[in-house]
Amino acid sequence: MVHLAVFQFVPLWGWLMAFKDYKIGRSIWSAEWVGLKHFEILLQHDQFLQALRNNFAMNVMQLVAGTVCAVGLAVVLSELRSKWFVRVVQTMTYLPHFVSMVVVANIFVMLLSPDRGLLNDLLVKLDWIDEPIFFFGQATWFWVLHTIILTWKGFGWSAIIYLASIAGIDPSLYDAAHVDGANRWQRVKYIVIPCIIPTLVLLTILSIGNLLTGGFESQFLLGNVITAEYSEVISIVALRLGLNQGDFSFGTAVGIFNSLVSLTMVLIVNAIARKYQTNLF
């Protein structure tokens, strides 16, 4: 509780900066009160709606793809009988989680490079394309590439939680299904999937809070000037317009906006989940 209070709640006093015209070198208390001026600037900014759209689109795509892949991997691994093969697959799929996003971004930039990138070389040799493709030069492809890369990096790690949930299923349910003549697919459909739904809902509620705040490092590292229309999220806009120009009050207003919207979304989703008795709180 002390750690939570010191490092999570005490720093909230800095939110005052969003309601003042703070300048570097002056104290917050001496700065002039400006009310909601910075929030009005944020909502009226030309790039705000575009960055908001990018935030939601990329995080929703990543949430859906990551969840589907993690659940699918966990179900498949739980049905395999070869323990050593399961361990190998688990290790291969969750290792990317520990790799820095900087390294992952460089790997994919080199892999997809039009200048002797491995994928382009392969496609040319197979005569599927005539000229190398500049994947990160196609703005409209950025959301898909970003989803594939982030899903590859994280779905193996997420599958561990679902595997633990599947391991906790009462064995008598499998025995009863075996007596009734259920095949493997029917066991998955009527036992495994329903039993992991509470875990699925719990993780989804936790992820909903990141739909707006989540995302900076990957978009910053994978994006470029060509893809800026589809890669810039609110955090990057705040960095560019707020911190880089020394307008810390504007940057703080962006942070408060993100936090309030995320909290609202978590409460809404939790209220919906409560109707099905799978709520978080």
Image: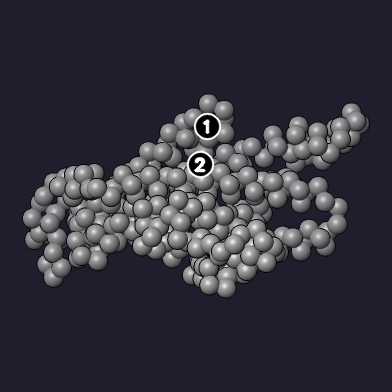
Rendered residue at 34%/49% (across/down): 51
Q: Position of residue 100 (x, y in %)?
A: 52, 69
What residue does disc 2 label?
205
Q: Position of residue 117 (x, y in %)?
A: 58, 70
**Please, is residue 201 above or below residue 70 in the view?**
above
Task: Give left or right: position of 84 versus 273.
Answer: right
Quadrant hosting residue 186: top right
Task: Give left or right: position of 160 versus 256.
Answer: right
Residue type, mark 1 in image: Ala
Q: Nearer the viewer, residue 264 or 30?
A: 264
Label 1 sits on a secondary structure element that is helix
What residue does disc 1 label?
273
Label 2 sits on a secondary structure element that is helix
Rendered residue at 39%/63% (across/down): 224
Q: Position of residue 119 (x, y in %)?
A: 62, 65
Closer to the chain start, of discs 2 and 1, is 2
Quadrant hosting residue 192: top right
Label 2, label 1: how far apart the Cα atoms are? 9 Å
Q: Position of residue 194 (x, y in %)?
A: 69, 34
Task: Give left or right: position of 27 versus 48.
Answer: left
Mark 1 surroundings: few (<14), some (14-19) or many (≥20) residues within 10 A: some
Residue sitting at the far bottom = 116
Residue type, mark 2 in image: Ile
